[in-house]
Image (tube, grey):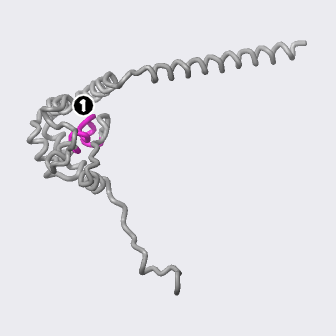
């Protein structure tokens, strides 16, 4: 067949799983760790990000990100887990599956679910306090509030008009 479809000339590639994509991105020097509020590893905020940074630091592909004692976030998470940065990095590299790593962390840190919940709330509050509060964001919130107020006033006028129109 000329110019037609033949199954032999189609390359089918299976989709990359999340870990393979992370490794591929690290090799392309596009490394970006998961979000600080991600609770994908052990159900604790920041551990997934810490895991990505530990693995990238071990591979020498961390780029401009900081790991361990150089990072305020990492020191807070590692202190909560009672694990050194070196021990965590060794475990993150040795245990390549997030669920297994999470189980290891929970076994090692011996924290209750209440302590984990409290830590997660603390990390979320810390992250929100670090978010930039620029003038653009403030102005956008003001404008959306003004628009909401205008909608409400129009609804009140419309309601009044319909009520008074049918009274006569």
Residue drawn at the location 39% of the way across and 73% of the way down: 11
In the image, is 161 to the left or to the right of 37?
Answer: right
**Is any atom of residue 111 visible in this view?**
no
Q: Position of residue 105 (x, y in %)?
A: 17, 41
Q: Is residue 13 above or below residue 144?
A: below
- Front residue of 12/100: it is 12
Name the secondary structure under disc 1. Answer: helix
Q: Is residue 10 left or right of residue 99?
A: right
Q: Residue 33: percent from the left, percent from the top?
A: 27, 42
Residue 153 lies in quadrant: top right
Q: Which residue is mark 1?
A: 116
Residue 70 placed where, x, y %?
14, 32
Q: Residue at x 66, y 21 (%)?
A: 151
Residue 108 versus residue 25 in the image, above or below? above
Q: How many marks?
A: 1
Question: Is residue 143 left or right of 17 when viewed as pictured?
Answer: right
Task: Indicate the position of residue 86 as horizontal and vertical percent values.
Answer: 8, 41
Q: Residue furthest bottom?
A: 1
Q: Left or right of 77: which side holds 157?
A: right
* Nearer the observer, 138 or 156: 138
Confirm whether the magenta stretch covers residue 75: no
Image quarter where the C terminus lies is top right
Residue drawn at the location 14% of the way across and 30% of the way down: 79
Q: Which residues are magenta?
A: 40-52
Q: Which quadrant of the structure image shows residue 88? A: top left
Nearest to the observer: residue 40 or residue 22? 22
Tell me if I can see residue 71 in this picture.
yes
Q: Residues within 10 Å of mark 1 (few under 14, many from 20)?
A: some
Residue at 86%, 15% in the rendered image: 165
């Amino acid at each position: 067949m000329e110019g037609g479809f033949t199954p032999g000339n189609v390359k089918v590639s299976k989709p990359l799983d999340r870990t393979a994509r992370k490794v591929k991105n690290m090799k392309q020097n596009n490394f970006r760790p998961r979000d600080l509020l991600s609770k994908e590893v052990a159900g604790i905020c920041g551990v997934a990000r810490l895991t990505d940074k530990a693995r990238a630091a071990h591979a020498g592909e961390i780029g401009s990100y900081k790991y361990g004692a150089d990072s305020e976030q990492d020191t807070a998470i590692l202190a909560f887990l009672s694990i050194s940065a070196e021990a965590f990095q060794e475990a993150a590299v040795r245990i390549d599956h997030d669920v297994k790593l999470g189980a290891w962390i929970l076994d090692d840190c011996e924290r209750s679910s209440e302590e984990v919940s409290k830590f997660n709330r603390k990390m979320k509050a810390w992250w929100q306090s670090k978010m930039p509060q620029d003038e653009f964001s403030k102005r956008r919130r003001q404008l959306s509030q003004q628009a909401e107020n205008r909608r409400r006033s129009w609804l009140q006028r419309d309601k009044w008009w319909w009520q008074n129109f049918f009274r006569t």
